[in-house]
Amino acid sequence: MAREPVRTCVGCRARARKAELVRIVAASGLRVDLSGTAPGRGAYVHRDPACLAAAGRAGVLARALRTGLGGGEVGRLMLEIERIGAV
C-alpha cells in the first residue's frame, strides 16, 4: 500500500496530504501548479484563500519561494485559484 505524500501549508503551518493543497511555483513568474510537477521552486497552501492571504501578509510565501512578491501578486494568485476551480 503506497503512502501519500504530506506537505506543510506555508500559511497556517498545518500538515496535510499533498492532494489537499495547492502548489505555487516560482519559475519565470509566480503561478499555480495544479499538477504538482512543474519545474521551479514551490510552496504549498491550503485551498482556503485565508491561508494564502496569511502567507502573503507575513511574507512567508516570498521567503519560501525565495523571491520578492509585488503588492498585487497574492491577490492575483487568489483569483487564479478561484478561477480554475481549486477552491
Image: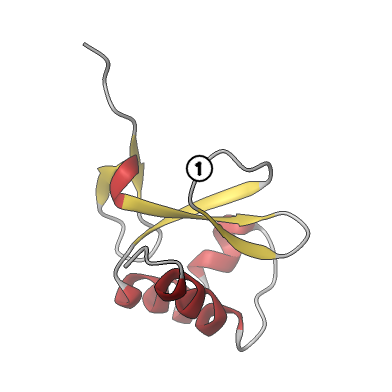
Position above or below: 47 against 54: above
From the top left corner, tell me how far across and down residue 83 is, in percent. 45, 74
- Foreground pick, 84 / 21: 84
Q: Amino acid at mark 1?
A: Gly
Position above or below: 61 against 69: above
From the top left corner, tell me how far across and down residue 74 is, in percent. 53, 79
Residue shown at the point (31%, 77%) measured from the top left = 50
Q: Quadrant of residue 70?
A: bottom right
Q: Quadrant of residue 31?
A: bottom right
Position above or below: 74 against 81: below
Classed neighbour count for the residue bearing mark 1: other residues with Cα under 10 Å, few (<14), some (14–19), many (≥20): some
50 vs 43, left or right, is: left
Q: Quadrant of residue 37?
A: top right
The coloring applied to the image is: secondary structure
Q: Which residue is mark 1?
A: 36
- Foreground pick, 1 / 11: 1
- Foreground pick, 15 / 78: 78
- Which quadrant is home to the C terminus? bottom left
From the top left corner, tell me how far across and down residue 55 is, in percent. 43, 71
Residue shown at the point (26%, 47%) measured from the top left = 15
Residue shown at the point (56%, 81%) measured from the top left = 76
Residue shown at the point (32%, 64%) measured from the top left = 47
In this view, the residue farthest toward the top is 1
